[in-house]
Image: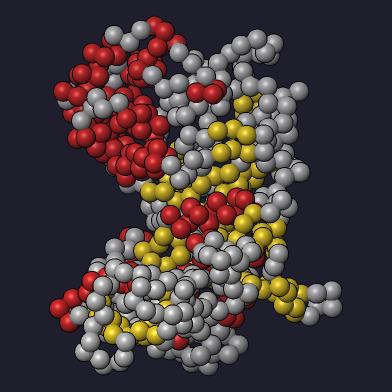
């Protein structure tokens, strides 16, 4: 039996009167006043009794209000009226604050063919243009403008002018709002829905901006992610890929620990790396798209111009693969804001075809709006197609460019890399014996010790031992980020004299020979993983065993990746050694 209830929040249909409290923003069910007629002073007692025992029939109507004593003293601000008073508390990243101070204007030289003025004047042919200028973007073949260029465009359209880095005017509506495909209203679906809370139809199209760029002179106000280290979380190997327990408390605790170590070096998570690619695989499958959208939702971008204080995400997904020329190739992507919203509302699900994403079927508890996508047919005409039951994954992607520095200047400078974490299945185990072996050659030299400490995996392991104090671990972060070798050596001397390091040294002296050789393999191996860290403007191998091959590293003849001598297949492309 369903009863209709009319209140200042609108019309509700309920089975249990106790469900009225969240619908009416009432603190408790007892604070709701129920009457049979509008404006009546006769309150209904026995609130806890069933509707049937109160004498109601299916479809009857009640009138409800919240007791004056239970109402909040200040009415909540509408989400559409969020102003600078709330946005001022948003802690944006330093790169966003820096770019907001840049005018972003594209300077142009005097045009000898059209400019008729002197050298100290300008006209419409040589005056600076906005970073979102359509003609400039088309000329430079820029498919996606930078986020801050898009922000300038939105502010211009909303007639918000002046220095956007200054304080925002009070009561000014904020122009950005993330997409939301949930049913948000008086009652959650399926109990209630109306034209106001019903999500509109979704039309997938190319996103005009991207949150991260590989910045060049042709991309105004661009942002780049600089990868300094790669952390490998625990993962289970499957025949068709890897399995991550991303919803478990253990996984969250592990990543939080790695994040803490990264923050000591001025780093933050910027994305994840996917690999195990070959000629017959897809660069980004529908399952990986959904994972990328999930990770972007877990790493929202703080933005003071958004009504919620968040807009999009800077989280990047990279695919590592060998190309047809036998070289290592990197492809970088982001999932669009539409993809993030569809993932948040549980509207999409991977399909058995890697290049297709399925639209969920509606259920009694899941409302699914109409979803469409546009394409150009064989007659070069635009066509709008229904995305159900499936649509190509490229409608969810925003591609990024990438590059490698001509003169690398890595943050971590250790020439003897420490074992990478979570590689027990490859017989590489981080132990105190391995720590002893890692620093053995640096005794008596502060410079060598500082260089060996400059290893992200070594820092994460040392911080996990609970032997060094928090101040000791912070000191290692200062050694890694020191501006000069002299400062790094001075801080290293301070670390070696600390009580925590002295305790560690005593424990290393007691480290058994078995610990020293446990999981012995090539410590020079590197690998790819799932969570990357970046700084600045943002930001395998196994033990030996009778393989019959030489003891030196070997380069894969398919993708040229250098592998451990103990490996019978390539860690990059998974193809056999012979």
Q: Is residue 62 above or below residue 266?
A: below
| Residue at the (38%, 66%) spot, across then down | 310
State how the image is colored. Answer: secondary structure
| Residue at the (26%, 27%) spot, across then down | 466
| Residue at the (34%, 76%) spot, across then down | 54
Q: Residue furthest top?
A: 513
Q: Nearer the viewer, residue 65 or 35?
A: 35
Q: Position of residue 241 (x, y in %)?
A: 63, 39
Q: Is residue 459 above or below residue 217?
A: above
Q: Nearer the viewer, residue 151 or 388?
A: 388
Q: Nearer the viewer, residue 261 or 106?
A: 261
Quadrant hosting residue 136: bottom right
Q: Is residue 176 above or below residue 158?
A: above
Quadrant hosting residue 40: bottom left
Q: Quadrant of the C terminus?
A: top right
Q: Position of residue 42 (x, y in %)?
A: 23, 87
Give left or right: position of 341 versus 305.
right
| Residue at the (62%, 50%) spot, across then down | 287
Q: Position of residue 366 (x, y in %)?
A: 55, 65
Give left or right: position of 114 versus 466.
right
Q: How many marks?
A: 0
Is residue 488 at least partly visible in the picture? no
Q: Position of residue 543 (x, y in %)?
A: 55, 16
Is residue 467 at least partly visible in the picture? yes
Q: Nearer the viewer, residue 324 or 315?
A: 315
Give left or right: position of 430 versus 43.
right
């Amino acid at each position: 039996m369903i009863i209709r209830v009319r209140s200042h929040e609108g019309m509700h249909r309920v089975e249990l009167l106790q469900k009225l409290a969240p619908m009416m923003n009432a603190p408790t069910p007892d604070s709701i006043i129920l009457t049979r007629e509008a404006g009546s002073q006769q309150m209904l007692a026995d609130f806890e009794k069933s509707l049937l025992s109160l004498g109601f029939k299916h479809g009857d109507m009640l009138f409800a209000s919240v007791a004056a004593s239970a109402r909040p003293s200040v009415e909540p601000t509408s989400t559409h009226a969020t102003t600078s008073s709330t946005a001022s508390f948003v802690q944006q990243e330093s790169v966003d604050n820096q770019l907001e101070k840049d005018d972003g204007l594209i300077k142009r030289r005097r045009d000898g063919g059209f400019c008729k003025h002197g050298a100290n004047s300008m006209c419409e042919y040589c005056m600076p243009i906005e970073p979102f200028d359509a003609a400039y973007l088309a000329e430079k073949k820029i498919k996606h403008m930078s986020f801050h260029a898009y922000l300038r465009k939105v502010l211009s359209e909303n007639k918000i002018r002046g220095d956007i880095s200054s304080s925002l005017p009070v009561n000014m509506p904020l122009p950005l709002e993330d997409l939301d495909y949930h049913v948000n209203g008086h009652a959650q679906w399926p109990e209630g829905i109306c034209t106001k809370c019903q999500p509109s139809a979704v039309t997938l199209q190319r996103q005009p901006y991207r949150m991260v760029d590989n910045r060049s002179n042709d991309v105004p106000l661009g942002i780049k992610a600089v990868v300094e280290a790669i952390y490998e979380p625990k993962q289970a190997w499957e025949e068709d890929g890897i399995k991550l327990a991303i919803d478990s408390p253990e996984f969250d605790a592990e990543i939080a620990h790695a994040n803490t170590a990264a923050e000591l070096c001025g780093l933050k998570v910027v994305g994840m790396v996917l690999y195990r690619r070959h000629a017959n695989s897809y660069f980004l499958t529908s399952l990986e798209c959904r994972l990328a959208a999930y990770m972007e939702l877990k790493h929202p971008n703080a933005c003071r111009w958004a009504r919620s204080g968040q807009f999009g995400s800077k989280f990047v997904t990279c695919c590592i693969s060998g190309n047809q020329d036998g070289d290592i190739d990197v492809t970088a992507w982001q999932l669009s804001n539409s993809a993030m919203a569809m993932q948040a509302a549980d509207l999409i699900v991977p399909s058995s075809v890697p290049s297709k994403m399925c639209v969920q079927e509606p259920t009694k508890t899941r409302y699914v709006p109409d979803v469409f996508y546009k394409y150009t047919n064989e007659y070069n005409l635009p066509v709008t197609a229904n995305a159900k039951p499936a649509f190509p994954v490229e409608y969810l992607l925003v591609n990024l460019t990438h590059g490698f520095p001509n003169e690398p200047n890595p943050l971590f400078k250790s020439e003897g890399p420490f074992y990478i974490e979570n590689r027990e299945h490859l017989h590489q185990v981080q132990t105190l014996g391995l720590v002893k072996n890692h620093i053995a050659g640096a005794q008596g030299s502060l410079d060598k010790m500082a260089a060996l400490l400059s290893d992200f995996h070594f820092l994460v392991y040392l911080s996990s031992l609970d032997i060094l104090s928090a101040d000791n671990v912070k000191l290692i972060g200062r050694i890694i980020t020191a501006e000069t070798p002299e400062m790094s050596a001075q801080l290293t001397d301070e670390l070696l004299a600390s009580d925590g390091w002295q305790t560690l040294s005593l424990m290393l002296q007691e480290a058994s020979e078995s610990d020293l050789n446990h999981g012995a393999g090539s410590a020079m191996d590197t690998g790819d993983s799932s969570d990357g860290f970046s700084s600045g403007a943002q930001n395998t191998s196994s033990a030996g065993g009778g393989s019959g091959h030489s003891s030196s590293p070997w380069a894969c003849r398919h993708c040229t990746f250098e592998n451990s001598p103990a490996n019978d297949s390539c860690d990059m492309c998974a193809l056999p050694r012979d």
